[in-house]
Amino acid sequence: MDWDALRAQFRLEPGWANLALFYLASHPKAVREAVDHLSAQVDANPLAVPAGLALPDGPTGWPRVRQALAACLGGRAEEIAMTASTSIGLGVVYNGVVTRPGQEFLLTELDHNSHRTAARLAAEKHGNTVRLASWFADSATATAQGIAAAVGEAIRPNTRVVGITWVQSSTGLRMPVRAVADVVRRANEGRSPADRCLLVVDGVHGLAAVDEDAAGLGADVVIAGTHKWLFGPRGTGLIWVAPDILDQLRPTFVSFIGSGGTAALSPGGFLAFEHAFALPVAVALHEQLGRARVAARVTRLSTRVKQGLGRIPGVTVHTPADPDLSAGITCFSVAGYTHQQVVDHAASRRVRLSTLNYTRIGTAVINTPAEIDTALNSLADLAR
Ligand SMILES: Cc1ncc(COP(=O)(O)O)c(C=O)c1O
């Protein structure tokens, strides 16, 4: 499938360049049809769920969903718990970590509010603390070695979790997860399992945007929504847990996925099964496109963004130029304007940007070089 054919699957508002597609997935046609197909079955006979639903090519349910995601992550189906979002996954993990009072969770201000809040709420309940460190002074010039060294220096004997973000939505920086995992592994030498420092990764902006196996990064836990870069059904997400630390996590909710192990971490109840069970279709679409090809296009588009922004006077790019330290989110500032003013100006030119700590341009695989040029031209007009 070529990129134009893929783009044609989306019902995006015509006439707009939407460069904020990493916020929440617009459903591609294949996913919309799968959701409708399942929804009709639930409406016809709600008793058919969760065991008896089928996609056009065969039965679907949690085993198939977890199998499909395992292939996507480079892990095994039994290592995956299912959630409805990244935020719920983070809550499940921080609430579930077996801790002793006095142990700490180590994060930074640049991790998402959902991550910091999950850590804080769990810490308050269980007699733990959250310490916010800093891995670099300036995201644009950060280096993998510098980040790994900063993590190594920050870990203390009572650090129970190092929580990091694969691709930060605050800066666009892609954390060198493997290098951090090496540092955490060294810090763990000689520690008992109860003292072991766990590496927890909020992977939402890496999954399906970066050509890496999330389960092979060296992390202990990877949490991600599947309703952003993967274009999975809205209200879907996962937690991947390394088998050797599973006994360090306790469930918080009843699970309706009956297979025990990591599945026991999945918040249960009757969910939007027509969304959850359509996930294999999104994974199949991603596989059809090819993960390496998708990641290469995301990188190509974000490189065009960075190079274009670099030519506009008064614009400061906060995301590293190095493709190994960035992915599909580029963060920047325009001198003399607030981030909201930049977003509003772009919207007046029918360009959707978003803002968190900075103004952000997200380059999804369905965006085009022409849309990026429209955005860059609107920013050049503002800066003039
Ligand atoms: C880094 C990061 N983590 C977590 C979230 C929350 O994701 P979700 O909507 O899947 O809960 C976001 C939201 O975009 C995010 O940017």
Image (tube, rainbow, N blue to C red):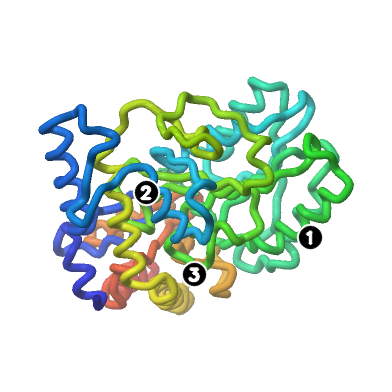
Residue for badge 3: 211
Label whose residue precedes the other's in the sequence (1 or 2): 2
Residue 4, placed above or below residue 28: below
* Of the pair 328 and 267, the residue shown nearer to us: 267
Residue for badge 2: 65
In the figure, residue 128 lies in which quadrant?
top right
At a point 39% along the width and 76% down the height, the residue shown is 293
In the rendering, which numbered label is found on residue 293? Answer: none
How far across and how far down the image is residue 190, in percent? Answer: 89, 47
At a point 64% along the width and 53% down the height, the residue shown is 219
Disc 2 packing (10 Å; few <14; some 14–19; many ≥20): many
Label whose residue precedes the other's in the sequence (3 or 2): 2
Q: Nearer the viewer, mark 3 or mark 1?
A: 3
Q: Is residue 7 left or right of residue 167?
A: left
How far across and how far down the image is residue 42, in percent? Answer: 17, 34
Residue 122, placed above or below residue 150: above
Residue 375, placed above or below residue 230: below
Which quadrant is home to the C terminus?
A: bottom left
* Of the pair 246 and 297, the residue shown nearer to us: 246
At a point 78% along the width and 57% down the height, the residue shown is 183
In the rendering, which numbered label is found on residue 149? Answer: 1
